[in-house]
Structure formats: structure tokens, C-alpha cells
Amino acid sequence: MDKPFAITLDVGSSLANHTGSWRTSRPLYVDSLPPCNNACPAGENIQGWLFHAEAGDYEAAWRVLVQDNPLPAVMGRICYHPCETSCNRGQFDSAVGINSVERFLGDEAIKQGWKFAVPDKASGKKVLIVGAGPSGLSTAYHLVRLGHQVVIFDAGPLAGGMMRFGIPKYRLPRDVLDAEIKRILDMGVMLKLNTRVDNILDTMKSGGFDAAFLAVGAHIGKRAHIPAGSAAKVLDAVGVLHSMEGEEKPMLGRRVVVYGGGNTAIDVARTAKRLGATESIIVYRRTREKMPAHDFEVEEALQEGILIKWLSTIKQVSDEGALTIEKMVLDDKGFPQPTGEFETLESDSLVLALGQDVDLSLLNGVPGLEIKDGIVQVMPNMMTGHPGIFAGGDMVPSERTVTVGVGHGKKAARNIDAWLRGGEYAAAPKHELAAYEKLNPWYYSDAPKIMRPMLEVVRRQSTFDEVQGGLDETSAQFEARRCMSCGNCFECDNCYGVCPDNAVIKLGPGKRFEFNYDYCKGCGICVSECPCGAIKMVPEDV
Amino acid sequence: MLKQCEGSHAVASAVAMCRPEVICAYPISPQTHIVEGLGEMVKSGNLAPCEFINVESEFAAMSVAIGASAAGARSYTATASQGLLFMVEAVYNASGLGLPIVMTVANRAIGAPINIWNDHSDSMSQRDCGWIQLFAENNQEALDLHIQAFRLGEELSLPVMVCMDGFILTHAYERVDIPAQEQVDSYLPAFVPRQILDPAEPVSIGAMVGPEAFTEVRYLAHAKQMQALELIPQHAAEFKQIFGRDSGGLVRPYRCEDAETIVVALGSVLGTLKDTIDEMRDAGHKVGVLGIVSFRPFPLLAVREVLKNARRVVVLEKSLAVGIGGIVATDVRMALSGLHLHGYTVIAGLGGRAITKASLHKMLERAVKDELEHLTFLDLDHNLINRHLEREKQKRRSGPMAENMLRDVGVVAARIA
Amino acid sequence: MPFQPVKFYQTGTFTVGNRLLALEQRSVQANMQRTNSLNSGHRACQGCGEALGARYAIDAAMRASNKQLIAANATGCLEVFSTPYPETSWQIPWIHSLFGNTAAVATGIAAALRVKGRREVRVIAQGGDGGTTDIGFGCLSGMFERNDDVLYICYDNEAYMNTGVQRSSATPPAARTATTMPVGPEPGNVFGQGKNVAQIAMAHNIPYVATATVADLHDLEYKVNRAMGMHGARYIHIFVPCPLGWGAASNDTIRLARLARETGLFAVYEAEHGEVTSVSKIRKRVPVEDYLKLQRRFAHLFGKTPALETIARIQAMADKNIRKFGLLEQGGQ
């Protein structure tokens, strides 16, 4: 075309005009730390595995999950999911049901028979683990993945620790537990049951171990000084729950009183109900708000007909099992104070759920160890005062949950690995937290959380069937898709679309985006309209 | 084919034979009969393929033509007077964008006072708009110039205005030779636009141009019109070959060879002038007439060539540049730069006032004696002027001028009162 | 059926793309091969809503027409920032003629295409609110009335921005412009004036009229697509915030468009042959202050003594829109 001068122009020629020179600040893609990941005691990359679950690639999701936690089916049942408590979506409608999706993935893995991969390169190092509970198993898993040989000694007849001997079946069916333990053992972990370690140094020496990880847990029920008649039936909660796994079920009677306010107290009371108690009563010295047990567990217990006497302490137990209860009142600081008012509560048995102590006998004579308040002290790298001996789980200072134990396992394994290689493990610096304020929640459609199905109350009162059901695939995927992907690009194409200057380059599926700074004028729309806060503005050097 | 018909009809026939593809029309006297004729041809299917669009204003008419032409369609419209002024912005735009639209201007006065009759004020107001302006002397030439206009405009990528006197030509029945379609087809090739809006070869038309190139753009517009000065005579010559008659060209001198006094004029008044000159020649005066066909581009050299041996030039024009006098006269003066000639400007025929042979005789007889005022208003009624001036002197609010004058004239006094 | 939000897909369909959506559910803008009809290098201000709206609309029209598209453009920001010699940002056949004649130029193009039998090539006319609601209104009305085969798109930023932010007939009450300064007894633009061209377009009984904003891309693309599926005169009025003229942050462009809709100040709907056929409901209703406060053109309402009465009048306008168009969901608030 013989175009008229100046008036008629060739299309697209403005590409010669690099408007990027107008910019005073530039957008940058960032990966921030989602609050769920930040809150997870097991250090799971929750946003990362939900990303795959959203797309229906459950195996990929599971494989991302088990990079941190080898027990997803267990975790999906008994974890108290601090991830959900901190989930940003909670400020939008309701938290993502991370725990439900985790359980779905765990169950799916069992159903599909997915296995852990074992590295083909061996380090030649051998590590002893004492205790086949959550932290011991987790440490074993991670150490094997790092190429080390692992042997677990456990004093009990079955692996699982508190997962088996502390948590009732109706919360964690044993076939699920067995399947996940087996998958770890299948990696080549040697497990020696009914093997109590009496002297750790001797055992290490005789077995030729290069390091040890101690995770014996806290299995000794605390006793309170309650004057009791000689005929009174006073039991401890750990013992009751432990004996549930044996042939002989505990004989608790028709009226069972549980003393304490933790999750163990709830577990015992609900177990007693299932064993046939007509009345299962928890006596607790403070109020519901102050109760350490998780509220949803309290709620489930109440649904099942468990009674709770608030603001009550047990002063004494008569031979006939009559309990003298003193009413308490909370002072200004929230501590219970006696009122001098008494009442009597009849009981067939009293179960004390007042916490647990650690059996530290295997550590006798180990030099350098520091023990405080009956708990083994460890350094930030999980090593005790004795080089090569690491410890974790309920026997070290921490919150005593399975998830924390699993998290200890990963952390300990990394540090043991580093120590065996003569170095120190340095964790990658944490990304900036993806706070809710950094999101643009407009883009998330309204989708309230899907509640998991619950077993009907009648069956909960009489059987040990699992109380909480799982989600089907559609629901699990729906739930996964409620994830807002806080702080991490999920390829929604918003930045690519909203740029008035076409200055965002789409790199294709899975490859995210890039800025074309030749044309980006720095308006910041992409930052404002990024749903998940994965872009930030930084000043240009002008 | 010889035919006795109205000028508008003749033009409509000529335009139709040029195979226009888009015609847009907004009614304004005295242009109406042209587009009415075309509208009927399109509606009846006799002119096809062609889109006839009844627009809502002259501004839209020119704008539709701009769009159509830019999309490669041969486009035509017609207007006059207020209508031309209403579309002015688009008129400039069409030429600026180099779109070869052909438009008939049925020349008519501009208000206020509103006046539907003929003079050249409308198209003269557009002398700098970048269009080629061709003036027809009679209906035959009006017909012929439209055929030449499409050819010229499309060859240069410039719009062309064919100016014909309103009513005097548009509504006059005359014998015209209506050409055969084959003749027109052999003279006027299909429209091959220089630029076109087409998804197959996208371009951006109508960029904003700043000081860095605006002068060059304007220079090129001028250069195109200079090119037209060469093309117009060539096209007239080719036209004669095919159609067998003289039509168009830059200028048309009549009995100018030895003339001492030459009258310069445009449009239909040339006929009356020629008759007057003939009679004056018979009376022994060496007078001649120079008709200007192409007012834009203005043929400076051709005009100078004709006038250079005369002793005096009288420019008779149907428009007034208020505050100076002539419009055409100014251009003629430019053609005569350096020559020593007596120059007279005669403003005549404003708002449809008849230009009679008698008046012309009277005026020219004074001119040949160099008794004419340099700026003369032909047949000016001094009584009307004086009475009005007297009224104004006496009373500031002396009432509307035009109505007062009409009352003085007495023609329509009854209706106004 | 109008654009239906997908039931739930993580972020629904409010985002531009989303890897989880089926290809046909993704927007044109999510496509790596989108036309970028208005390409990089244009000289629009940072955060220009009009540049964004134009690319959204024209890219959608390009897809709908299989790239057989010609556009006529009115004088204004869009024209000036896209085609200063020697560069153009357009990738399509495009013409700029004048400020007030765009609809007529488009009519001419459509006529030329029809006469040449090129039915597959479609015509769009586009301009700002000044070129549409004021100076170009005559030609626009003529184009509507004749039912010419043109889709006219108005990018409404509520004033003459190109000339330095003067009032147009689309400027809202109370807004400060260079010709409606916040002084005198009624500061800013007066109440009771202005022109709603979408409603006037409906009164022409043309086949299709729609309003949209740059905040809801899917809805906008749906409407362009719907319009392109029809012949005859069609009109889409797109709300495009102007950071410069409104005194707003450049990153708030989409947010403002969203708030205009969520307050009810800008009703989003579509109509066929003069009758409303669908309305975009307000999702999370907010008071007009939330929208006004982000813009310095309304800053005089929020001085030391807030102009509560004026704000209430603006709220009443929003409430009226909500009633008139039924912008709330059943049982919504």
C-alpha cells in the first residue's frame, strides 16, 4: 500500500516506544509464606499440595504432602489443624478444610497403594531410633529418604506409640494407622518390637549406630494427691486408653468420673461411654473457655451425652466411690479458687487425666544430658547435650501432639543427616508471611466450607466406629479449590489480563508469568488485582 | 444521447454512470433534486450495487462518505450553503485523509439573512479546505465535470467539489448530451484506493501529527494540487477524445486574443458575459472573457498567460470577502504579480440577484473607460442602503435590517407586517 | 442467556483466566495468543482504564469476528495516545476522522463493506464519553435510528480527559472538573443534569444495548461477543476509571470500576430491542462513600465538615438505580 505520509501508519509500530522509562516503581512476583504452611507443626507445604489437589492430580498432591509428613491419613484424622485456625479464608467465609483434604489424600493413597520412593544411594550411616511413635516413625522416614539405614526399637508390642495407645479407635481406625506405618517400614526400616532400651549408650555401641534419636514419649500418668479409701477404684487415663488395645478391656462400671480438662480426659470419658457407662462425667476445675481440650472435641463429647462439671475439684474419694467435690470460682486472673462449698458425686470409678510424665530410665548414665522438670532438653538442632543423641516428641519441651511429633521427626532427621555428614543443617530463610491484607479477596467466589459427615450419635455412644467421616472426591476437590493460594501464584491470569500496557508475558501452563519492563509503566494494577498477593511493588532506582 | 432535462437530473445521470457505491444525502435546496434522482435509481435497482444512505445531517453525510471511501467504496454526496458549512470539519478531514470523495455543491448564498438563492459564498468559503473545486458553466459541463471529477480525485487521492449554480443550473431545463455507459466506463477506471481499511492489510489511518511533520503533510497536500494542474488539461483532452466535446480544463478564454479588457468569472454567469462581450465587440470594444473552471487548484500560469497582454481586468464574482472585496479577484491579482494592469472587482449576483446583460453593459462601458470603482457592487440599490443608515443613525434599536429593507422595497411588506 | 458465573472454581470466574477452567470458559484475555489489538508502547497514563477497556473489547471483537474487524475511532485520549505519528498501537484496520462523526464514519465503512459483499468484515465505532454523549451524539443517534450494522463502544470516564478534565454530559453530580470547580454554593458538577446514553440507545429500539465495566472482564467479553453475534446497530457502554481525571491512584482503576458497580452508581445490564434482558446483581453492596473517597474529584465532600447532604443525594442516586434495575439479589441487602 502506498500510504499517505504521516497520516497513515503501519500497525503495531508503537512497540518502538519503550514506556518502561516512565516507571518509578516496578512490580515483582514473590512467593510469600501462606499462613497455613507457617502454622503447620509438621512443616507441610499445604498450599503446595492443595494446588495439585485443585486440579484433581491427587497423587502429585500426596507426593508433595509426604515430602514433609509420611502420615497423611493419620494426620487427616487426628491433627488439630492449626493450619485451619490460621487460614486466611477464615476471614473471608470459613477456613479451607485442609484436614479433610489431607485425609482424602491419605485414604486415596492407601486405596491406590501409592508407595514411598527410596533413594538408591546409601550413606553407609546407621541410626538408632527409640520409640515407634509419630516422631520416631517420622524421623525414620526422613532419614531413609536421606540415604541412611534406620533401626527402630520399641518397648511395646505394636508400633504407633500414642497414636495407638493414646488415641481411641473411633478417632483413628487401626487399619489406617497400620497401613501408614507399613508404608514406612516398607522403605527398609527395621523395627524391633517389645524391645526396651535400658541404656542408650550400650545399645548404640553394641548395634554400631552412628547416632540415635530418642522418642519414647510420655506414657506415665500423673497422680494427684487425693485421699482415697483403699477400696476406691482410681485409675489413670493413659493406662485406661492403653488397655483398650489389649485383650482385657478396662472395667469402669456404670458411673465413671474423669478428672481433668485435656484432650485425654475427653478421650477417656468418650471411651467410657462406649464401654457401657450410663454416666460418664468429666470434672474440671475451671470453665469451658479455659479448658485445654479442643472445643470441637468437647462439643462432640457433649453430643454423645458426656456430662461435665465445671469449676469443680475432687477433694477425696470414699471406699464406696463417693467423691467429695468442692465448687470453685475463678479469680480476676482466671485461676480457680476454693469456695468451701462441697457436694458429693457417686462413682464406680475415677480416672485421673492430669497429664503424663516421661520414662527417662534409658538415659541413666549418659554424660552431658540435661533434664529439666522430667523433660529432656535439646538444642535447636534437636540434639541433646550428648553428641550424636537427638531427641524429640513428647519427651522434649513442646506441645504434645502427633503433628508436633511428626514435625520433630523431619527436623531431627535433617539435623542428624547434617551431623552425620559433619555439617550443620541450615533451614532456608522463611518467606514473608502472606497476610490477609495482601490479598484481593474479591476474586474468590463465595463457597462455604464443606462439613465432614459425622456418625449418628446413637452409634457413637455404643460403638468404636469412626466418628468423623471423610469427604468424597468431589467434595474434597471442592474444598481444595477453596484455597486462596495465599502469597503464591496459582496462574489465574489476572496480572496478564489487567495490565493496560500488555506488559505481562504469560509463559504457559505451570510456568507462571514475567514482566516486560520495556513497557511496564508501573501503575500497580497487577499488584492490586492479584487475588493472592503474589506481586509486590518495589521502588526503582531513579 | 441528447435529452432535454433538468440540470439536477443530468448530474444525477452522470453520477450514476460513474458507478458510485455509497451515496449519502441530506436534503438542502437547491441540491435536493440530484440526490432524489439518485435515491430513486438505487431504490429501483437501476443503480446497483450502491448504498443510498439518508443521513441526519450534512456533517454525517460527509462523515459517512469518509468512512465509505476509506473502506474502498466510490463515494458521493451533494450539498449547498448552510449544509456545506455544517460539514466543514469533515470537508477538511476528507481532504486531509486523501479520500477521493466527489461532492456536488449546488452553489447558494449563506445566511444570515437566510437565502436559498444562488451565489458562490458557500464553496468560496471552502477554497482552502484542500479539495479540488471545479466550476460548471452550464448543465452539460456540470454533467461532464462529475465524470472527470471521479477520475481526477481517484487518480490523486483527493476529494473533488463540482460547483454548479443553484437553481440557475440545478433547476434549469436544458438540452444535454447524456453519454453512453460504455463511454463513461472507458474513461473512468474502477476505483483502486491508495489506502484502504482492510483486515487483510491493516493500517492506522488518521494519526495525530505534530510540528515535526505537519508542515510536510501540508506541503504534500499542496503538491498534489499542483499535480492536478497538469492532470486536469490531460483529462479534458482525453475526455474530448471519448466524448467528442470540450469540457473541463483549467480555464476557458473567450475572445481574449487581442482583448484590452478581460472579464474573469466562474460558473453560469459566463454565458451572459459571453453574450454581452459579443455585443460589445460588435460595438468595437476589444473585450473578452476568461472563464475559470478549476478554482482549486488555481491555475496561476494559465490565467497570467491569458491576461498578460490586456490593459485591464475585471473580476466579476458571486461572492464577497467582507472587509476586502473579492475572493477570486485576490487570486487573479496573484496571477498578475508584476504586471501593470488596471484591476476591478465586481461583486454581482449575491443571494440570487439576476445579473442582466444591461447591467453588465453599463458596468463594462465604465470599465473600458477606467471609470469603474475598483470595488463595485453591481446594481447596488443606494436608496435602500441610505434609508437604512439613516434609520440606524436615528435610533439604536432600529429593527432588523433585512426586514426593514424588504419593507422599503415593498415586495413582501404585507407578509412581514 | 447472559454470562453465567461458573458455580465454583477456586476463584470462580472473577479472575481473568484460571488454569482450572475449561478452555472455552477462559477469557480472551487469558489466551497467550490474544490479539493485543491495542499494543504496548501506547502513551496512555499509568493505570488507564480506557486503554484496558479498549483492549478488552477489541480483542473480544477480534475473536468474535475471526479477526475480520475494522474500527473507527473518535478524537480523544484513546485516539491521541494510540496513534501519535510515527507510531500506532493498533493492530487492526483503524481510522480516526473527527471528534463528533465516528458513528457516521462507521456507517460509511459498513455501507462500503455491504456494497462490496464483504459481510464477514465487521465494523466497530468507539469513542470516549465526550465523543459519544456530547459532540458525537447526533451521528450516534442517526446510526442507531437507521439500524446501521455497527457496534458502537463508548469508553466512559466521565469527563473530557484529553483536553484537561472538563465536564461532559457523563460527568456525575458533585464531581470536580476543570469547568465544574468545587466552589460556590453547589461545589462540583450540579445535580439534575447529564445524559444516560445507554437508556437513550434503548429508546431507539436497536437490537442490543449493554453496559459493562473494566472490573468484570468476563461480563464485558460476553457482551461484546453477544453484540458481535448480531447485526444492526448495537451499543456497549463501558465504564473506565481515569486515574488522572478522577484523582485516583493508578492501581485503583479496576477497584473503582468494581465499586461503581457494587455501590449501584453504575448499573450493569443488557437490553435487546429496548427491553432489559439481564442485570448484573450487586455482589457485596457498599455505601457510595467507599467509592467517592478514593477520588480527589470528590475530595470536597469529605473536608472538615463533610457534605453529608450531597453524599446522601449521591447515595439516593445509587439507591434509585438499585430499585430501577433490581440490582440486588432476592433477599439481598
Image: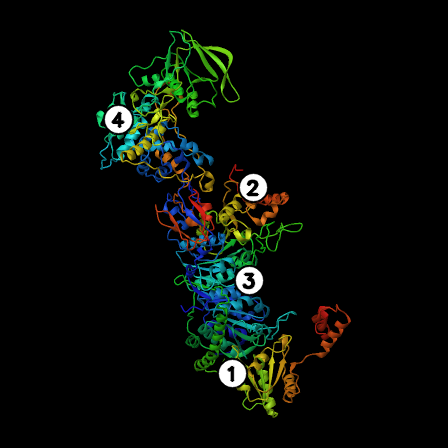
- Mark closest to the chain's N terminus, 1 or 3: 3
Is residue A458 shown to the viewer in this render? no
Q: What residue did someone put label 4 on? A: A152
Which dot, 2 or 3, sits closer to the camera? 2
Q: Look at label 2 and name its amino acid.
A: Pro
Instruction: Name the subunit of mark 1.
Output: B
Q: What residue did someone put label 3 on? A: B56
Neighbor class of circle 2 (other Cα within 10 Å; few <14, some 14-19, many 20+) is some
Which dot, 4 or 2, sits closer to the camera? 4
The disc label shown at residue B301, or none: 1
Residue furthest out toward the bottom: B284
C238 or A203: nearer the viewer? A203
Is residue C171 positioned above or below A470 on the image?
A: below
Residue B159 location in percent, x, y?
A: 49, 71
Residue at 28% across, 16% down: A247
Do callouts 2 and 3 mark residues in contact (Cβ within 8 Å)?
A: no
Secondary structure beneath label 3 = loop
Q: Look at label 1 and name its amino acid.
A: Leu
The answer to whether residue A360 is left or right of residue C131 is left
